[in-house]
Amino acid sequence: MAAYKDTERNTWYVAFYYRDWKGVNRKKKKRGFRTKKEALEWEQKFKQRQAPSLDMLFSDFIEVYGEDMKPRLKYNTWLTKEHIIKTKLIPYFGQKKMNEIKATDIIRWQNTLMEFRDENGIGYSKPYLRTIQAQLSAIFNHAIRLYELQSNPVHKAGGMGGERQKKITVWTKEEYMKFSEAVWDKPQSFYAFEILYWAGLRVGELLALTANDIDFEHKRISVSKSYQRLQGEDYLTGPKTVRGNRIVDIPDFLCEELREYLGMLYGYMPDQRIFQITKSYLHHELERGAKSAGVKRIRVHDLRHSHVSMLIDMGFTPVAIAERMGHENIDITMHYAHMFPTAQKEMAAKLNQEKVG
């Protein structure tokens, strides 16, 4: 490697050839370095990104990981990953080489996170600890799959955050009806919660709805996009899953309520979002309504769980529910299995009838 002095600008630059991912030789030139050392370091890192060696620093491999993954992910998904990487991974592993990170390093890192307490004495939640570790493991798996790292030290170190919580909190129909009466004073809130509970949409899907998405003749909602507000900007993306693109049939009363709501809006265009609110707004409104109605506190997303619970109680099959909810597969039976309390007994009884006639 060599760096050259730019006498006119009093800076340094590098000029070199490299082989790209297609195997084609290309020339690269980069100016503007203050020192020769900075120029040579930049050239070294650039070449590592073109033909990554696991002898590189974790922080440098993150650049490779970002270049590989960012084009494949939704913008909001990448921002979530990036935040975890920058705040929870690079500070600890950044200056360690990828091929030298051992299970013992992972365990020490785990202990650091589990011992953390903020100024109020509160640590990270178990689900968040699992999310952080899953991201670190994903990075090493990527290195194994594409760049021939031999093993994943996270797997050797074991889990963090304990077992997954299996309990899902829902409202019964009676609890929801009390809540809906408590938020009736704000029509925008009331109609938004009606859709979340009676149609089971995700919050992002609700916030992306336009008048064009509602078919009053056939009484159904077309779900084809999701709304996110990220770093002060509005983004419309596709639904969370491929099957998230779906048609949701709605009951007559909800169809009429939506007609009423649109009649309240002034000067909107058919392709404009009909709920110009945020997830934070819905969260605060849910807390307000729950407190006023005297029902237990749940999350906004739990209204979707409540919709599933209601459909199960009505006797619909997991396959039919998964299609309505836009789940990618029938893992719904695993997440909501405890809501089928009599299913096993009914199966046994019917099998007994088959045997004895």
Image (cartoon, helix red, strand yellow):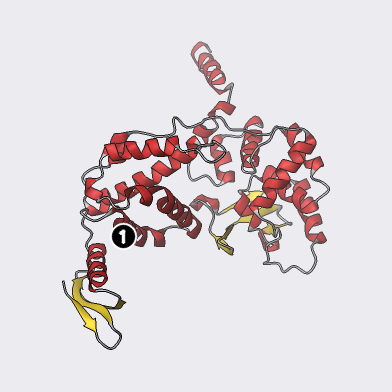
Judge from the rendering whether residue 17 lies leftward or rightward of residue 230; answer left or right. Answer: left
* Residue 245 percent coordinates (x, y): 55, 54
Q: Nearer the viewer, residue 326 or 12?
A: 12
Q: Is residue 17 above or below residue 192?
A: below
Residue type at numbered disc 1: Val
* Residue 25 percent coordinates (x, y): 18, 74
- Is residue 250 visible in the rendered image? The answer is no
Q: Residue at x 40, y 60 (%)?
A: 70
* Residue 140 percent coordinates (x, y): 30, 47
Q: Residue at x 23, y 54 (%)?
A: 147
- Is residue 287 visible in the rendered image? The answer is yes
> In what element is the residue under mark 1?
helix
Judge from the rendering whether residue 8 lies leftward or rightward of residue 264; answer left or right. Answer: left
Q: Residue furthest top?
A: 356
Q: Is residue 2 above or below residue 103?
A: below
**Quadrant (top left/top right/bottom left/bottom right) for the N terminus:** bottom left
Judge from the rendering whether residue 218 lies leftward or rightward of residue 335; answer left or right. Answer: right
Q: Is residue 119 above or below residue 203?
A: above
Judge from the rendering whether residue 74 lies leftward or rightward of residue 297; answer left or right. Answer: left
Residue that numbered label 1 is attached to = 64
